[in-house]
Amino acid sequence: MKRSLFLFALLVLFSTAGMAQKKSKKDYLITIATDQGTIRLVLFEDTPKHRQNFLKLVEDKFYDGTTFHRVIDDFMIQGGDPNSKDNDPTNDGAGGPSYTIPAEILPNHKHIYGALAAARLGGPMNPEKESSGSQFYLVENHEGVPFLDGEYTVYGQVIDGLAVIDKIAEQPKDYRDRPTTDVKMTVTAKKMKKKKITELYGYRYED
């Protein structure tokens, strides 16, 4: 009897482990719509804290009406600050949802062209490299920005609309690198089969 119970427990354990390792066949396609064009991206599954937070903010429509408030040609475009919704451009870059996210910096996620990464406070004020609760940037440099690898959490990748990133980065701007004309965004998430995402945009998931 004891042997039977032991074997049953092992069977349950292995079955549960197998279920935990099974990857979903679906993913969320993120769409960032702007008056300069549409950007589509996916979020990495191995940065779950950033992924979950981003999806929650999208669901709450937190990003809708925010702007790309800091753009640097041949570097990156940054957005996601709720302060950018108001009429005071001087406070852009200082806002967020009043919390930070623990760093999920992984060696396999690099700052390549189109990478999605979390902005954060730098220097001794943030030794743990915790991410902003909402602000993010998209890498615009076509060669990538490898000097940021290991310093900021990369948690997604643009799979369509790279030229739109270039277009936004080239917008006229002031001395704060803020576009002189607001580049507002509306962000949505749609669950799709990974196979469909690959067919439409050529993005290939790791097995």
Image (cartoon, rainbow, N blue to C red):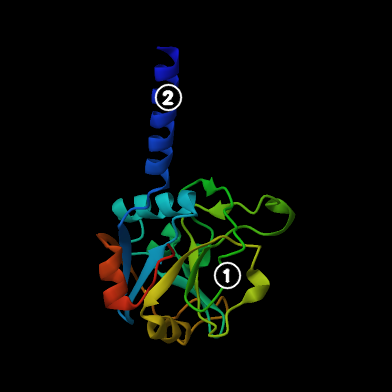
| Label placed on residue 7 | 2
| Element type at mark 1 | loop
Contact (Cβ within 8 Å) of mark 2 with mark 1 = no
Decide if residue 34 is in sight here: no
Count of number-bearing discs: 2
- Measured from the top left, where is residue 79 in percent x and y? 45, 67
Q: Of the residues shown, which amino acid type is indicated by label 1?
A: Lys
- Residue under the image location 42 percent in, 50 percent down: 53
Does residue 29 appear in this view? Answer: yes
Mark 2 belongs to which amino acid?
Leu
- Left or right of residue 104, residue 69 in this image: left
- Which numbered marker is on residue 102? none
Q: Residue at x 46, y 79 (%)?
A: 179
Q: Residues within 10 Å of mark 1 (few under 14, many from 20)?
A: many
* Mark 2 vs mark 1: in front: 2
In the rendered image, residue 174, in percent from the top left (x then y), is placed at 52, 81
Structural crowding at the residue carrying mark 2, measured as other residues with C-alpha within 10 Å and reported as few (<14), some (14–19) or many (≥20): few
Compute the Cα span from label 2 to label 1. Answer: 44 Å
Outermost top residue: 1
Q: Quadrant of residue 62?
A: bottom left
Measured along the vertical axis of the image, is residue 70 above or below residue 56?
A: below
Q: Which residue is mark 1?
A: 110
